[in-house]
Amino acid sequence: MRGLLAASMFLGLALGQGLVKGLSPVEVEGVLRQAGLTYERVDAREFRLEMAGLKKVWLYLDYCQEERCGVLTLSAGFTLDEALDLEVLNAWNRDRRFSRAFLDEEGTVWVESDLDLTGGVSLGAVEAFLDLFAEEILPEFMDHIGFEP
């Protein structure tokens, strides 16, 4: 019954394209299905997606109060054969507006992007965020660091 209620609430939001100021994990699953993305829910607020030829792109829900979360973060990590020059990452961060890149403690290269929902966004904006990451940020970043999936 709870799932039916959440589904009907999501459908109502999708049809009306009203503003949302946060999403529950169930609502995020609805957006992912609507966007046609292959995904797996791996934790209460974490999903593994397939995007841009990659099998492991992470979607995290953050800034959560009760079941609603105000920030969505997409990230992907890349293990390279040779260490990446930090100037390459700095150039990415300097020249790009909607994502950031960094090295973690193990030397994995990451690219991330956030969407803040707290001011109110349409579900179309959430889908556009997913599309931007899949169709522009990931392919451009992989080219930037010399990674081929």
Image (tube, rainbow, N blue to C red):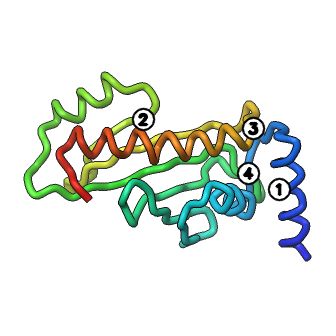
Q: Secondary structure at mark 3?
A: loop
Gap in Å between the C-alphas at discs 1 and 3? 12 Å
Left or right of residue 80: residue 32? right
Residue named by callout 4: 23
Q: Secondary structure at mark 2?
A: loop
Residue named by callout 1: 10
Gap in Å between the C-alphas at discs 3 and 4? 11 Å
Identify the image quadrant of the N terminus: bottom right
The one nearer the camera, 61 or 74, is 74
- Of callouts 2 and 4, the N-terminal one: 4
Amino acid bearing label 2: Ser
Q: Secondary structure at mark 1?
A: helix
Amino acid bearing label 3: Ser
Tag nearer the camera, 2 or 1 = 1
Residue named by callout 3: 122
Gap in Å between the C-alphas at discs 2 and 4? 21 Å
Q: Quadrant of residue 52?
A: bottom left
Relative to 117, residue 58 above or below: below
Identify the image quadrant of the C terminus: bottom left
The residue that appears at 67% across and 63% down in the rendered structure is: 29
Q: Quadrant of residue 24?
A: bottom right
Estimate how packed mark 2 is, as few (under 14), some (14 to 19) or many (20 or more) residues with alpha carbons within 10 Å: some
Estimate how packed mark 1 is, as few (under 14), some (14 to 19) or many (20 or more) residues with alpha carbons within 10 Å: many
Residue named by callout 2: 99
Left or right of residue 149: residue 24? right
- Of callouts 1 and 4, the N-terminal one: 1
The residue that appears at 91% across and 66% down in the rendered structure is: 5
Q: Secondary structure at mark 4?
A: loop
